[in-house]
Amino acid sequence: MDFPLEMSCLTAGEGLVTEEAQPAGNPLIILGDRISATRHLTAFVKDLKQENSLLDPGEQVKYAICGDSSEVATTLKKYADDVKMVLIGPGLGGNGVTVARMLATKAHIVMIIDPRVNPLGDDPATYAQVQANLEELNVILSLTKDADEAFFQPLIKEYVISGMAAGTDLESMSPEERAKMIDKRLDAVNAFPSLPDTQRKVAALDDLDPPKKWAEAIDDDLPTKTVILRILNSARYGFRSRVETIDQAVALASARTIREIVTACQISQIFSKTSEGTIDQFWKHSLAVANFAKLLCLPADPAAQDSQQKTELERFQLDEDQVAVMQDVKLWEKIELGEEDDPFTSGLLHDIGKVTMLMCLEDSLELVMALIEQEVQEAQAENKMWAHQVVDIERFLMKDIDHQVIGTRLADKWEVAPSIQQVIANHHQVAEHAPHIVKLAALADIAGNCLFPYPATDTQHPFPILFDRIDKAMKKSTKQGAEALDEIISEEIFEDLVDVLNRLDLPNHLWELVDFKSFFKLVYVLAPKIKSATIGFLQQTA
């Protein structure tokens, strides 16, 4: 028996498959399931046909058939204003629970559970936990045996035909209510990760505390201690004698350096168990942003350096041309940081919400990447580069949550320093009068995307593509060094760079700190050293 496609129906990527297309703007139900003559789907179609018989053509309800979670995302994007309900059936490919939790405030979610293919968990405790979590998010759940005509009819009337609004708005809630709702959206089985004891101990230390106190905080954590000593004995630090203890490490390398290494190690360990295959790409991006944030605010003029800044700059092993460009731009003169501001850690943690989302919303990256790829193809069809902030894609899917919101909630639970919390919360929405540490992190994030974008790949993101064009033009140029680079940026990529920056809608006041041409010239020149430092750190902490 064939499934009865008797009304206006859209199939992902195929368009209309019925006699007459419905007018644009009709309400739409996304049907995420394997299409077959199952009892619940037959009941759904029968109810929908009956309701449509009572409506004018301009009001009749369409439905779109999606075989997997990625198709759900792309169909939602294509028909965003029309989608009123998402029906998740047992045949949907991908993680139906994640789809339900992500879209819970975007549209009305109905989930049909087949006990033989149980998406809520194999043991009773997990099943009950996930069921309760979804019900708290107003997801309607039904077993296949109960999903009959009497079940679907009132849902179609209330959720779709009457146009009842879905979900709630975080902006209208108190901070306490907002935190609780975020936890509900994210905490089903995989809870927010906890901060390791070593990180807590180190975070509580002052940079002026004696080396012995630092050793007491770190010595019992053998993996972290081993990594610290391995890094400090590498060629980058070049100490004359081998560093054998944490006491020596703090005395020789500074407490801030030890804090940076510990934080990178501990945060990496927290998320090492994620099954997401792009986790290395995430860490490359985060470390590149951390290194850029650290380097961009270091004085390159010896007269402006204190001894610690001189040492930190030397560790990047810049050549004369790289130092000259830093001295020409003088970005350090425009950035005023407070004593408590930590550029490296701020850069390292700025996107912590992205990897937390991977842990709490398994397979969520697939939905985000599906929309990125769709947009990339649309841009290429117009002979343009893709240029869209991932935070906007996340908010499209989750309405009022993005990686900044998720990261801020995690940082609050971890009791991270206030300035770092501001970076995590606002690095994509930088206010004109935001603290300079937030502006620095935003610039470092742009710079990091030139080398290691995430989650978009270097064949999708416009900045690596533009840098590749600079590389090729530099090889052909008859000029050398900064002169050649100036000419290429001004003549070869200028129009495309301006177009990309405009479409990314980056805050104009960032370019009051440094004009964008000088900034990208600086980033391009420093990129080899940042790349080397990032890859080297990952190799030493593997």
Image (cartoon, rainbow, N blue to C red):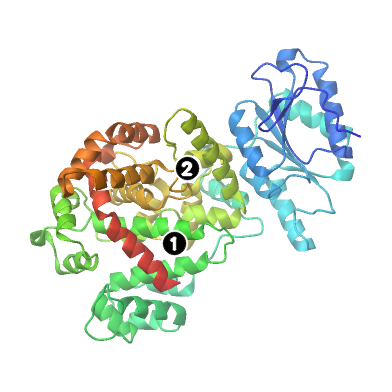
Q: Which mark is residue 280?
A: none
Instruction: Kindly state the secondary structure of the residue where label 2 is placed.
Output: helix
Callout 1 touching callout 2 (CB < 8 Å)? no
Instruction: Kindly state the secondary structure of the residue where label 1 is placed.
Output: loop
Tell me the amino acid under the disc marked 2: Val
The residue to which callout 1 is attached is 415
Residue toward you, 255 or 78? 78
Q: Residue furthest top?
A: 56
Q: Which mark is residue 390?
A: 2
Residue toward you, 225 or 498? 498
- Residue 409 lies, with reference to residue 144, above or below; the image says below
Q: Quadrant of the N terminus?
A: top right
- Residue 510 lies, with reference to residue 163, above or below; the image says below
Does residue 411 appear in this view?
no
Q: Earlier in the sequence, mark 1 or mark 2?
A: 2
Instruction: Give x and y (percent) for residue 182.
Output: 57, 49
- Residue 169 lies, with reference to residue 113, above or below; the image says above
What's the CA distance linking mark 1 and mark 2? Answer: 26 Å
Labels 1, 2: front one: 2
